[in-house]
Image: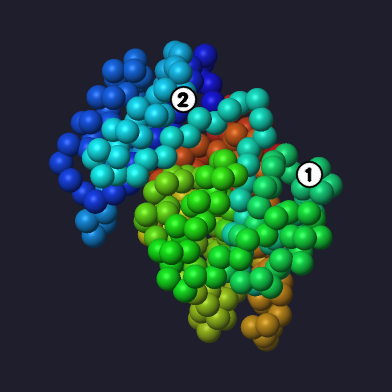
Amino acid sequence: MQRDGKIICEVTVIGPDRKGIVASVTNYIFENQGNIEKINQNVVRGLFGMQLEASFNGIDKDRFTRGLRRLCKGLGMDVKVHFDEPDRLKNMAILVSKEPHCLETILKAKEREDLNVNIPLVIGTESTLKPIASRYNVPFYNVNHKDQASAEARILRLLDKYNIDFIVLARYMRILTPNFVWRYPNRIINIHPSLLPAFPGAYAYLQAHERGTQIIGCTAHFVTEELDAGPIIWQEAFRIRNGENLENIKRRGQSLEAKALLKAIKLYTEGRLEVYWGKVYIKSRGNSNNKKNGKEKE
C-alpha cells in the first residue's frame, strides 16, 4: 500500500512477554529508514502482542522481511509482515460453521460482480457448508480441531498460503484467541445478531426476546480480543411484531445479518473505513465529510 507516495508496511509481533521487544523491532525499522505511523501493544496472561504501521520512501521488501524474521526469531517471537499491494484485489478468507445465509449472500455478490474482492478459500468448523463453496468453485477447508489453539495454527498456515489480506467471520461460532486476533488488527470482520453493545455473546436473539426488546438487529464489527466489543462498522434493525415468536425473529434477523455483513465488506474493500480510538469512521466516496458508526451519505 502507498500513501502520499510512501510504502506502508504492517508488522505484527506476538510471543511470550519479555523485555526489549519493542526497542529491538522499532530500532530495526529506523535502521531501514522507516517511520512508525501507528503502534499498539497488549499483554494478556503473559502473551505479548504488538502491531505497528511503518512508512518507507523506498524499501527492498524481501530483504526487510527476512531481516525482521531473523530478528524476531532470535527474540523468540512470531512476526507477520504485510505489504498491501495497491495493484491487486484484496484476498478475503471466509470462516464459517453451519449457518448458510451469510456465506451464500457473499458468494452470490461475488458471482454477480457486486463485490470487488478475491475469495481464495472458505474455512469451516465442519463440512456442512462445503457444497455451497463448491457450487461457487471456492476451495473449502474443514478445520475441526477441538482444541482452538490447534485449529488456529492450521488456519494461520492456510491464510499465509493464500496471502490473505483480511478475514470475514460469516457466523463462525468459535471465539478467536488474542494470539490469532492480534495478527490481523482491524482486518477481521464479524457479524453479531444484536445491536451491540446490547446482548453480546451467544444466544443474542433469545436474550432480546426474553427481555421484551422492541427493536432488534445485527452488527458488523471489527474483532478485538474482547468478545463482541470491537469497533462497529454497520448496523441493521427491525421492529418486533406483537406476539412474534423467537423462530420468526431469528429468520428475519438472518436476512439482515447477511445484508449488514456484505455492506461492511464492501466498505472495507472500497478503502472507506478508518479506525480511530476504537471507533469506525466511514469515508464518503469523495473522501470528505466522514460519517461515524454506520451512517453515511449514500
Instruction: Check the image and tell me how it is coloured.
Output: rainbow
> Front-most of 131 and 6?
131
Type of amino acid under label 2: Asp
Name the quadrant containing residue 123: bottom right
Could one spot residue 235 in this view of the protein? no
Which numbered disc, 1 or 2, marks the residue that appears first in the sequence?
A: 2
Q: Position of residue 180 (x, y in %)?
A: 42, 54
Label drawn at residue 114: 1
Left/right of residue 18 with respect to residue 224 in the rendered view: left
- Residue 84 percent across, percent down from the top left: 54, 31
Q: Residue at x 37, y 40 (%)?
A: 79
> Please, what is the three-letter code of the amino acid marked with disc 1?
Asp
Q: Examine the rendering and report whether any part of residue 110 can be seen.
A: yes
Most extreme residue toward the right is 112
Q: Secondary structure at mark 2?
A: helix
Tell me the mark number nearer the camera, choosing from 1 and 2.
2
Residue 219 in the image, given as x and y percentages of width and height:
57, 59
The quadrant where residue 10 appears = top left
Residue 191 in the image: state x and y as whole percent: 58, 60
Q: Nearer the viewer, residue 281 or 187?
A: 187
Residue located at (17% from left, 36% from top): 20
Q: Secondary structure at mark 1?
A: loop
Q: Residue furthest left?
A: 19
**How far apart are labels 1 and 2 at the CA level?**
34 Å
Residue hosting label 2 = 62
Instruction: Decide: few, some or many residues near mark 1? Use Cα within 10 Å; few <14, some 14-19, many ≥20.
Output: few
Q: Residue at x 65, y 57 (%)?
A: 122
